[in-house]
Image (cartoon, rainbow, N blue to C red):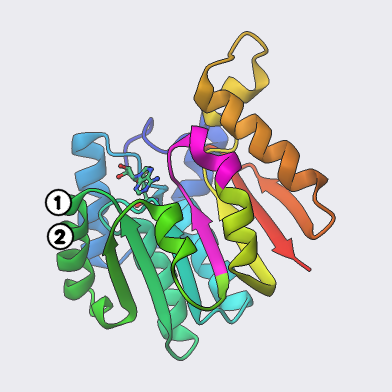
């Protein structure tokens, strides 16, 4: 895998080491990784993918909602976890028709499409109108939209459910006080809100660009 695609910008050697530990992926996942490398599409990569699989298994998750899906890479890791938990459903939600179509094809080839509900939509609105609660909600939407999504995610999380979010370091920008753009401010505000919320027990796993793991009480 490319050295620069998934790397933690601050500790590249450590990031490469951690990624190198992940066992070879199924051929379709490897194809998706190669596509990301070619096109520089920001997938979560294998180390974070494996974390998602692990959390799905540990939490015995059967219902997962993903906000801001790409062409199905992170979805595939959640779907493998749900499959190995005995089945359930994973929502793949993206506003790009083409990405949704690609995801359908990749996940069909992996034998996972039956588990996945594909929605072409703005993700927070889609979650708002989706019935029931989820064991895991993972967000990878535009970063300025993170703060406003929090109450909607929280409302749809089952007690004991996990909220996950990518890019909590925003490529190091959250650490740099001179960065005050809307996306960086969005990640900072979301981080403050989650960690201040007594209903969540939260941490940021410093894999790649930082992954929030927050358990709702
Ligand atoms: C970073 S990519 C997701 C990558 C994915 N997590 C993976 O690892 O395979 C985010 C995608 O979500 C889409 N997106 C961003 N904000 C969105 C929103 N509010 N609603 C729906 N899609 C959104 C973007 O267009 C992009 O295709």
The percent coordinates of residue 37 (x first, y second) are 25, 39
Assign a secondary structure to mark 2.
helix
On the picture, is 56 further left or further right than 76? right
Query: How many other residues sit within 10 Å of disc 2, few (<14), some (14-19) or many (≥20)?
Result: some
On the picture, is 101 further left or further right than 21? left
The percent coordinates of residue 65 (x first, y second) are 46, 66
Q: Which mark, by number, is residue 101? A: 2
Q: Which mark, by number, is residue 32? A: none
What is the quadrant of the C terminus in the image?
bottom right
Tell me the distance, in whole angstroms, between the alpha carbons under discs 1 and 2: 5 Å
Magenta residues span: 136-148
User: For this rendering, which residue is in front, 64 or 14?
Assistant: 64
The percent coordinates of residue 84 (x first, y second) are 45, 84
The residue lying at 40 percent from left, 73 percent from top is 90
In this view, 85 is above or below 49 = below
Mark 1 highlights which residue? Answer: 98
Farthest top residue in view? 178
């Amino acid at each position: 895998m490319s050295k620069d695609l998934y790397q933690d910008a601050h500790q590249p050697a450590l990031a490469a080491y951690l990624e190198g530990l992940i066992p070879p992926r199924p051929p379709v996942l490897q194809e998706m990784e190669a596509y990301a490398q070619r096109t520089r599409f920001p997938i979560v990569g294998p180390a974070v993918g494996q974390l998602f699989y692990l959390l799905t298994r540990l939490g015995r998750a059967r219902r997962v909602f993903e906000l801001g899906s790409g062409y199905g890479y992170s979805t595939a890791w959640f779907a493998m976890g749900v499959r190995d938990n005995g089945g359930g459903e994973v929502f793949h939600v993206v506003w790009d028709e083409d990405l949704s179509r690609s995801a359908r094809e990749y996940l069909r080839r992996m034998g996972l499409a039956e588990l996945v509900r594909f929605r072409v939509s703005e993700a927070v609105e889609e979650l708002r109108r989706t019935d029931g609660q989820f064991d895991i909600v993972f967000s990878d939407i535009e970063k300025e939209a993170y703060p406003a999504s929090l109450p909607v995610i929280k409302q749809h999380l089952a007690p004991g459910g996990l909220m996950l979010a990518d890019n909590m370091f925003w490529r190091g920008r959250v650490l740099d006080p001179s960065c005050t753009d809307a996306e960086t401010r969005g990640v900072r505000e979301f981080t403050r809100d989650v960690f201040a919320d007594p209903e969540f027990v939260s941490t940021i796993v410093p894999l790649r660009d930082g992954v929030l793991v927050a358990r709702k009480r």
